[in-house]
Amino acid sequence: MKLKTIALAALLGGSLSVAHADTVKMECGSGATVKNFCDYIKQRFESETPHKLQFIDLPRASDEKLSMLQQIFATKDSSVIDVFAVDVVWPGVLDKHLLDLTDKVQDLQPAFFASAWNNNIVNGRVKGVPNFIDAGVMFYRSDLLQKYGEQPPRTWQELTRIATRIQGAEREAGNKNLHGLVFHAKAYEGLTCGALEWVASFGGGAFVEADGRISANNPKAAAALDQAASWIGTITPKGVLGYQEEEARAVFQNGDAVFMRNWPYAYLLSQDDSSPVKGKVGMMPLPKGGDGGQDAATLGGWQWSVSAYTKAPEASIALVRMLADAETQKQNFLLMGVSPSRTDVYADAEVMAKGPHLAQLKEAFASAVARPSTATRSEYPKVSKAIWNAAYDVLSGRADGTTAVADLEGKIKRIKGRDWK
Ligand code: GLC
């Protein structure tokens, strides 16, 4: 009897260490393309490890996602979430809530673009593994540009002229729903991305510079915002003031816009068999702010991190490693169109056959402008909110560019106080 008990204990102990099963709670969205990806990773994780995967839905907008995570982490709650996506601007903000992955993922580093990997290092510790890279790009209707004998524009002024011309002529010919330009301009993180592109492309800086100096109040920044406001109600529908990325994509993909500012994911989806604009879409760098201006694409992208409060660290790390491998990044591209952060995926034949545009994107990634998240440290969410509110005021006609950037400078100064912390 005694022997039997010992044998049973040994067996249980042994099986526990070999196959201890945890349930990992991971954020996975609910949109159609995201769901396919969630199904893929669940199937793989549950067949290749003894663990189970459960999905949690978080809000769609980056800033709302962040607030929700901050609420969850405020109480060090371990029951809600283990693994989640982290926006490129958050590692410094969420730092203490992110499990230190340094020793668990360091071996993966050589597979990734260095800038994507380094973005997740906070105070020398690795706090996340890159998922995908983003940079703002301009999509255009290649069929319409060709019909009107126009080339993809190099400057915003040129884009405005072409969009005005094609919108006018097409509407006259009965294409009543056509708009010249759509983008996402709801008051949220996505508008900070757009505002930075306009301002930086005019040579107006990045609101706060890398050394922490506040630069928002300058005439080039004001002119860039005034130009964007001039589109609203002319070549751009007023509705954009309520759009996030997906609303802009819906209009463009339905064939109702000549130009669209969006992230690269929109390309593959626009080429789906069900898409009315299949075969009619071009992608180009965002225009410069005039002849003296520069190319400026906001750098975006997402990482995978683990909650510092997780009760299932080993299983969560196993999941992050699976999320970061070449096969997952390939599926991520094929199912959702997002740009891999691993260099080897760009050499995959199936990926390149479906995404010849990826080669072009490397340029956009190289010239991308970062939002001031490193300089403003834990205050980034407040600074970003001040930026998107200033841009929103100008776009909605509540303020002109000059007034808005002066007010914005004052607000950012108050957030900064003596120094960024
Ligand atoms: C994209 C970018 C992300 C950005 C967000 C704004 O998801 O990858 O960095 O914050 O758009 O809407």
Image (tube, rainbow, N blue to C red):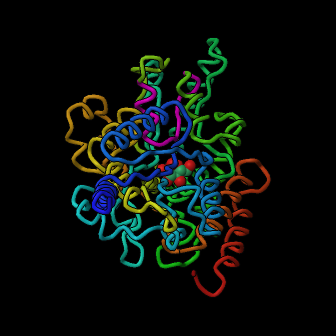
* Magenta residues (range): 255-271
- Count of picture labels: 0
- Quadrant of the rendered structure where residue 391 is? bottom right
Q: Where is 310 relative to 324, above or below?
A: below
Image point (40%, 65%), residue name: 120
Q: Nearer the viewer, residue 247 or 63?
A: 63
Horizontal arrangement in the rendering, residue 178 relative to residue 301 (left or right) = right
Does the magenta segment cover residue 385? no
- In this view, the residue farthest toward the bottom is 418
Image point (66%, 61%), residue name: 385
- In this view, the residue farthest toward the right is 398
Horizontal arrangement in the rendering, residue 386 relative to residue 108 (left or right) = right
Q: Nearer the viewer, residue 236 or 25?
A: 25
Q: Residue 78, how many percent across, how many down?
A: 56, 62
Image point (59%, 23%), residue name: 256
Q: Residue 273, how many percent across, how many down?
A: 42, 17
